[in-house]
Image (cartoon, rainbow, N blue to C red):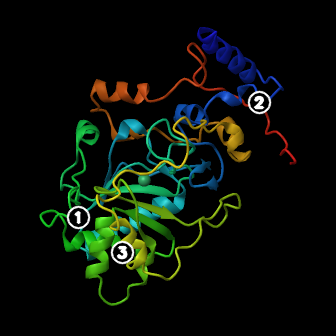
Amino acid sequence: MLRFVPRLVFAFSALFLAGWPAAGLADQIPAKRYFGAAKLPSEGRAAAVGFYSKGCLAGGEAITVDGPYWQAMRLSRNRIWGHPNLIHFIEWLGREAATKDGWPGLLLGDMSQPRGGPMVSGHASHQVGLDIDIWLQPMPQRRLSAKERETMSAIPVVEVGPHEVDPRRWTNAHARLIKRAASYPEVQRIFVAPGIKKKLCETATGDRSWLAKVRPYWGHNEHIHVRLVCPDGSPGCEPQRATGKDDGCGAPLAWWYSKEPYRQAKPSKKPAKKRETTLDDLPNACRQVLASGDKPGTITALAAYGDDVPADVAAKAVALRPDVGAPGAPSMPHTLPQARPAVIR
Ligand SMILES: [Zn+2]
């Protein structure tokens, strides 16, 4: 029976793509396939739709892959997209960090896919165009090649053993960069390694209110993750609870060091075989985002980089875009069924 399943899925997706009214059949297809297949953003006004870990991005904009104070990494992933607020944030942070904080420029990790949504690899969040990973490594003063942007790894600034910042790598400029980012009112929170939070708690002087936004979390030894608040004009954006006034340097930080060994592994609350997010799990507006045409004048990250892209990097970009349905299915539907009316429960 099992070997018929792919064929069944294919049959169902074919019905779905043809506009088969019985929505639900196609709901087995993971939403990340649709969003991973979209190369360019949707037309129309920019809006963050849904929650950071369950939503999408309408009318996304790309950050320039080479700015005066930043360079985008991992261009094959084409995750340089965000709400205009995120684009402006990067431009401002890059400039201020370089001119005031002694941080020579930002290396940009993942933002969102062109239409946001769940990703084929990596993050649970980054879905609505308001999240960005910034490497904790200063930008070199030369233009990185497309190949280097694929293969360079960010160097951790936290030592795995003691879970403290590595004094050979950590600098005051790191602290100034994070403080700068946290000081912007449009920043909702910043995820960092617990060792970084600890160091900031120990060394911050004067106003400490910005520390509330800096939150310890797993997996942030070599980058920070900055999240912006819901923008004006995005009524469908679901806000996250504000971080409050507590600087988080007391009990919340102690929790991370309360067990030996340090809670390195992220506990999984849910069973390992968790159901994939489907379009039905996302706001209805995300179906419209997928069905929209491409935003005029937009190009992928690799195309924006220019012409000296090695073949293997270009091939990687293609390989990362999944076919939507089963083998042989078209890569992207031109139209999707109209959004179904909300189910009344
Ligand atoms: Zn992130």
Of the two numbered discs 1 and 2 in the rendering, the one whose residue sits closer to the viewer: 2
Cβ of mark 3 under 8 A from ligand 1: no
Residue at image x 51%, y 51%?
125
Residue 322's place in the image compared with 261, above or below, is: above
Q: Earlier in the sequence, mark 3 or mark 1?
A: 1
For mark 3, what is the residue?
180
Residue 60 visible in the shown view: yes
233 or 174: nearer the viewer: 174
**Which SS class for mark 3?**
helix
Residue for badge 2 = 24
Residues marked 1 and 2 touching at CB (< 8 Å): no
Q: Residue furthest bottom?
A: 206
List the residue tagged with mark 1. 104
Pinpoint residue 83: horizontal percent, then vertical percent.
54, 56
In the image, residue 95 lies at what x, y percent?
Answer: 33, 68
Quadrant of the rendered structure where residue 224 is?
A: bottom left
